[in-house]
């Protein structure tokens, strides 16, 4: 029996990207039952743009975060497959069809999610190139059955939510990891390159580092929870990369007396990322590598600081109502 697919798009101040996102949904090679845009308290033209398409518009006021927006989409959806797509992404035309084939091939698979394309949705400069290249690389190397789901572009069986409930609305970041903790013990999760989306990533270094720090707050608790359940989370950086970066930053106070040490650790960091750097050189050329390595090191610093704070001070985790709210997924 054919599936009915409900595409759920959480959107916050997404006027820049929403039309490209919706165009990509309506250009899919397989039929879409319905498209639901959840306008999560936007103050720009997001709602007006959505009304220009034959989609269902659900409005939140005020902004409640991506978990609440996705839950509102789940409540409004009538399809037996829910395809989540962030409003700053545009799907490849065969992505929904590919997801359905994966779900049909294995009734035990509850979620199929995809990869970020190595080209951004809109080209906003070198920081964005760094982000999409890294995102593409680490997801692509993890293709296959995994124990972590990312819902920026993901197809999920409705029965998953009927059994597990929705996303944790207290979380405005790392909600994927929390939901994966509940999902992995019951259903298979497949990461596939048959689902691919171009992403309008962050193009400002400060904002990128802030985002990395914020998401790292739940990293250590999530890893501990996965370990207790006998699972292994899919992570963006290898342990060798994180360890070499930590050692490099620790060595900096001693650089005056032993300058060779940080140089050696920098080389170790590059060696830990050798595959990634070869990929970047193929995509953007060798001249881009120094910039890429510099930004990669900076994001590791933000990651280490966020993970340390999250491990030592659990109340520092980013939750709705605590600290500065992070909107649904606005780039600007």
Image (cartoon, rainbow, N blue to C red):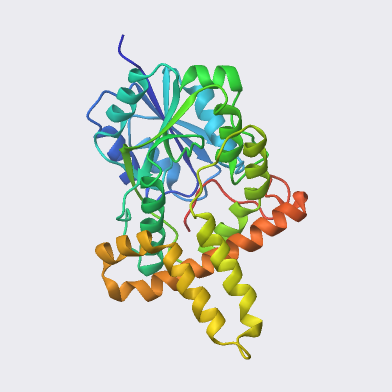
> What residue appears at the point 67 percent right and 35 percent down from the top-left corner?
228
Which sits in the foreground, 324 or 81? 81
Which sits in the foreground, 289 or 69? 289
Q: Is residue 326 visible?
A: yes
Q: Is residue 332 above or below residue 148?
A: below
**Quadrant location, the N terminus:** top left
Which residue ends up furthest to the bottom in the rendered image? 256
> What residue appears at the point 37 percent right and 60 percent down from the top-left corner?
276
On the image, the x and y values in percent for residue 24 come to 28, 39
Locate residue 229: give its quadrant: top right
On the image, the x and y values in percent for residue 303 come to 59, 60
Q: Is residue 63 left or right of residue 99?
A: right
On the image, the x and y values in percent for residue 49 come to 37, 42
Which sits in the foreground, 144 or 77? 144
Q: Is residue 244 left or right of residue 195?
A: right
Q: Is residue 156 visible?
A: no
């Amino acid at each position: 029996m054919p599936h009915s697919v409900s595409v759920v798009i959480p959107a916050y101040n997404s006027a820049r990207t929403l039309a490209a996102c919706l165009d990509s949904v309506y250009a899919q090679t397989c039929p879409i039952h319905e498209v639901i845009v959840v306008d999560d308290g936007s103050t720009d033209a997001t709602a007006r743009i959505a009304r220009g398409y034959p989609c269902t518009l659900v409005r939140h006021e005020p902004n409640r975060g991506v978990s609440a927006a996705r839950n509102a989409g789940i409540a409004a959806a009538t399809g037996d497959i829910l395809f989540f797509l962030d409003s700053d992404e545009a799907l490849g035309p065969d992505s929904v069809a590919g997801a359905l084939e994966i779900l049909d091939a294995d009734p035990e698979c509850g979620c199929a999610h995809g990869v970020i394309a190595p080209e951004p949705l809109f080209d906003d400069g070198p920081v964005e190139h760094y982000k999409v290249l890294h995102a593409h690389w680490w997801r692509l190397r993890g293709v296959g059955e995994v124990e972590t789901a990312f819902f920026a572009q993901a197809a999920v069986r409705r029965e998953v939510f009927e059994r597990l409930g929705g996303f944790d609305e207290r979380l405005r970041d790392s909600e994927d990891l929390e939901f994966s903790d509940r999902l992995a013990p019951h259903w298979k999760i497949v990461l596939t390159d048959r689902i691919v989306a171009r992403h309008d990533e962050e193009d400002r270094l400060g904002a990128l580092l802030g985002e990395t720090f914020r998401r790292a707050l739940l990293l250590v608790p999530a890893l501990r929870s996965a370990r207790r359940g006998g699972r292994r989370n899919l992570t963006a950086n290898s342990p060798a990369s994180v360890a070499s970066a930590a050692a490099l930053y620790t060595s900096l106070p001693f650089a005056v007396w032993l300058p060779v040490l940080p140089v050696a650790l920098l080389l170790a960091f590059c060696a830990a990322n050798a595959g990634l750097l070869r990929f970047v050189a193929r995509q953007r050329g060798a001249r881009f590598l120094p910039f890429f390595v510099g930004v990669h090191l900076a994001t590791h610093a933000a990651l280490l600081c966020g993970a340390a704070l999250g491990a030592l001070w659990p109340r520092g985790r980013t939750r709705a109502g605590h600290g500065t709210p992070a909107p649904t997924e606005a780039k600007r």
